[in-house]
Image (cartoon, rainbow, N blue to C red):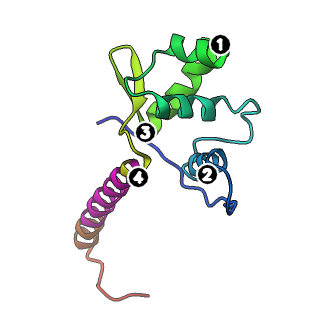
Amino acid sequence: MVEKSIHLVKVRRTLNGSVNDELMWFGRSLGLFSSRDKNKSCYRIFVELLESSDGLTSDELAFRLKITRATVIHHLKRLLGSGLVVKEGNKYMLRVVRLSDLIDELKSDLERLLRDLKKSAERIDHELNLSGSKR
């Protein structure tokens, strides 16, 4: 199994912001966009993938955004590592079409992980003869 990593970040949300403000908050809350990305390249790549129905190659992203392919690849690796973007052939696309579906999938992933962790913790507790009392 390939490891996927998302870092949830509590970010102050701008009320009544534009769709772009909301998308920026969304991505920052998922740990995708950082203040180190001065040109907002990762954000721009994310938006392009969101708007694309058939996916895009790294060359197409670089051309559309007028950034280097190396920059595109750097950010795509991060997005792939988060599990939010998938690669099919030579095209990159979001894991699902709608962002609300993406959150539902992330929630399912998290619930599955927490169930597995709980089972493991119970097995470890049993093996170590840890009592059921809380400290």
Number of the label disc, if any, that sits on residue 100? 4
Mark 4 or 3, closer to the camera: 4
- Ranked by sequence position, the earlier of labels 1 and 3 is 1
- Does residue 33 sit above or below 67 in this rendering? below
Q: Nearer the viewer, residue 80 or 26?
A: 26
Q: Is residue 85 magenta?
A: no
Relative to 32, is 86 above or below? above
Asked if disc 4 and disc 2 are in contact, CB closer than 8 Å, the reply is no
Alpha carbons under labels 4 and 3: distance apart: 12 Å
Task: Please name the residue that numbered disc 1 is placed on.
Answer: 68
| Secondary structure of the residue carrying numbered label 1 | loop
State left or right for residue 94 relative to residue 24: left
Q: Secondary structure at mark 3?
A: loop
Magenta stretch: give its range. Answer: 102-120
Residue pointed to by mark 3 = 84
Q: Which mark is residue 41?
A: none
Q: Residues within 10 Å of mark 2 (few under 14, many from 20)?
A: some
Q: CA distance from mark 2 to mark 1?
A: 26 Å
The residue under label 2 is 22
Which sits earlier in the primary sequence, circle 4 or circle 2? 2
**Residue type, mark 2 in image:** Glu
Magenta: main secondary structure equals helix
Which of the marked residues, 2 or 1, is nearer the chain's N terminus? 2
Q: Is residue 110 rendered magenta in the image?
A: yes
Label 1 – label 3 distance at C-alpha:
22 Å
Mark 3, mark 2: which one is toward the viewer?
A: 2
CA gap between label 4 and label 1 equals: 31 Å
Quadrant of image for the N terminus: top left
